[in-house]
Image (spheres, helix red, strand yellow):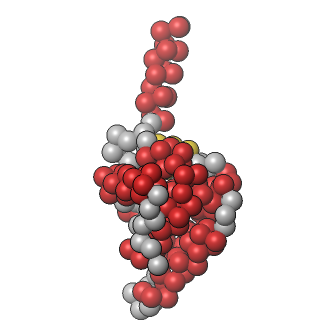
Amino acid sequence: MNALLTIALGLSSVICLYPRGQASGQAFVDVAPAVGMRVTPVLDAIVKSRKAPPTASPIVEWFKVEKPVTRVIEDKSRAADEALVVLLQFYIGESTSEDLNHEITKRGRRMLPYLRKYRRGLVHIPGRRYPDSIRLDPETWKENIDADIDSIRKGEVRFED
């Protein structure tokens, strides 16, 4: 009985390391509810923009993504600090991604714990599922996080105005 329980617990630990639909072998990091509330409008807008009919204007669709990102950037709370880092793992457009890097490095040292936390694994928002197609590959977002950490340590701001 104890052996069976040990095996079951071991398997559940392994299963929990992999996000649904991701076979990357990356650990994943759960997002707190307050952070998720700031991130889900952005991710929902990305998914919706990808489902837009071919006749829809791409500019209008990306504007619908940019609006909720701007709300997160303008929010100076700790949850918004963390949300900015969470968004680094998703494709939100080149210019918008640079805006995130700019804001993260501008906020400085207080961002380091979040950058380290989310560098360890894939973002998992409990109760939400997003297609893998909106995620950046781990190598890309880890390089991006490393560049933000390096800039903050040097006291630099990336993508200055």
Please name the residue shown 57% across and 61% down the image: 107
Residue 158 higher or lower than 8, as above or below: below
> 38 or 153: nearer the eye?
153
Does residue 140 appear to the left or right of 62 in the view shown?
Answer: left
- Locate residue 148: give its quadrant: bottom left
Residue 126 higher or lower than 70, as above or below: above
Please name the residue shown 43% across and 42% down the image: 120
Residue most toward the left?
Answer: 139
Please name the residue shown 49% across and 21% down the image: 8
Residue 41: x and y in percent read: 60, 68
Note whether residue 157 is visible.
Answer: yes
Please name the residue shown 42% across and 77% down the image: 95
Residue 83: x and y in percent read: 58, 58
Note whether residue 88 is visible.
Answer: no
Residue 60: x and y in percent read: 49, 88
Q: How many marks overall?
A: 0
> 6 or 95: nearer the eye?
95
> 87 or 5: nearer the eye?
87
> 152 or 76: nearer the eye?
152
Residue 61: x and y in percent read: 48, 83
Residue 160 higher or lower than 55, as above or below: above
Residue most toward the front?
Answer: 155
Residue 24 higher or lower than 133, as above or below: above
- Locate residue 50: give its quadrant: bottom left
